[in-house]
Structures are given as structure tokens and as C-alpha cells.
Image: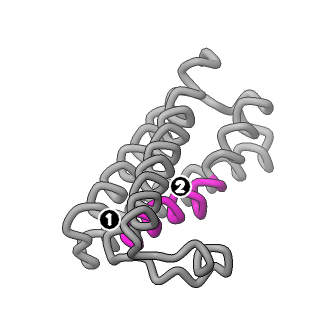
Amino acid sequence: MSIQAVLLPLFVQVVLTFVLLAWMAGLNRQAVLRGEVGLRDVALREPGWPVRNLQIRNAFQNQLETPVLFYVLTILAWITRHADVLFVVMAWIYVALRIVHAYVHVTDNYVPRRGAVFLASMIVLALMWAIFIIRILLGLG
């Protein structure tokens, strides 16, 4: 697989994270300018953000958690030459599920749906890791 094909899902995941970061920063700035949150409170990390700000923040922070395992796996798969068509397809499925998860998080935030999508993305990621580990340990690929 080409480096572009392998890294494109990772790039999309990174863009998703930055989009959520920019959205969160904009909302937080507006809350401070409207006086809903004081700068002194922000400095102490106790701002009492409005609910919508927290919703977007949580969606952003979630992109900094398990996707780290995806980033590491993608790099390892490329370096060890184990990033094949199956890997790229699974990477796209994982990233698509992360996009859906973020969408649910920032819209109705319905926890059962969000949880189901999160679980599906974790299953895909766990399978990606299992395949990679087995291939490495057995010298396959």
C-alpha cells in the first residue's frame, strides 16, 4: 500500500480532532466574552462552562483518548510493512465510526447510540491490533 493510502485515514482523524478543538475554542471564547465564564475561573480550571461548551469539549477530549492507539498502530503497521488492504479498510471503518461518534456527541448526545458506536469503533481497533500482533508474532506478512 502507498503511504498516502495508509496515512489518509489517520489524517482524517487528525482533522476531526482539530475541527472539534477549533469549535470548542470558539465557544469558550464566546462564553468568556459574554461574561458567562470568568477568566479567573478559567485560569484555575474551574470555569463552570455552559452545557454546550462541555458537550463539544467532551467530544474533543474523546478524540484524544483511544485514537492514540490508532495512531500508534498505523505508524507501526507502516514501519513494519504490515499496512495492507485489510489494514486500510479497517482503518477507514474505524475513522468513519469515530466521525459518527463525534457527530452523535455534538448533536443529540444520546448515550446508548453514542455508546454503541464507541463500542463498534473499539471492536474494530481491537481487531486491527489483534491482526497486527498475530502477524508480527508469527512472522506473517
Which residue matches tag 1? Answer: 105
- Above or below, comparing residue 60 to residue 92 in the picture: below
User: Residue 141 appears at what percent x and percent y?
Assistant: 70, 31
Asked whether, in this view, residue 82 is left or right of residue 38, the answer is right
Magenta includes 64? yes
Q: How many marks?
A: 2
Considering only order in the chain, which callout, 2 or 1, is on the residue closer to the N terminus? 1
In which image quadrant can residue 110 be found?
bottom left
The image shows residue 4, relative to residue 65, as above or below, that is above
Asked whether 109 or 135 is in front, the reply is 109
Three-letter amino acid code at disc 1? His
- Mark 1 Cα within 10 Å, few/some/many (few <14, many 20+)? many
Residue 121 rendering spot, x and y as whole percentages: 43, 58
* Dot in front, 1 or 2: 1
The three-letter amino acid code for the residue at tag 2 is Leu
Q: Which residue is mark 2?
A: 125
* Region of the chain picked out in magenta, as a range: 54-69
Residue 24: % across, % down: 45, 57
Left-right relation of 122 to 116: right
Looking at this view, is 42 or 98 the one in front?
Answer: 42
Q: Tell me where residue 91 appears, x and y as whole percent.
A: 49, 40
Residue 48 position (above or below residue 15):
below
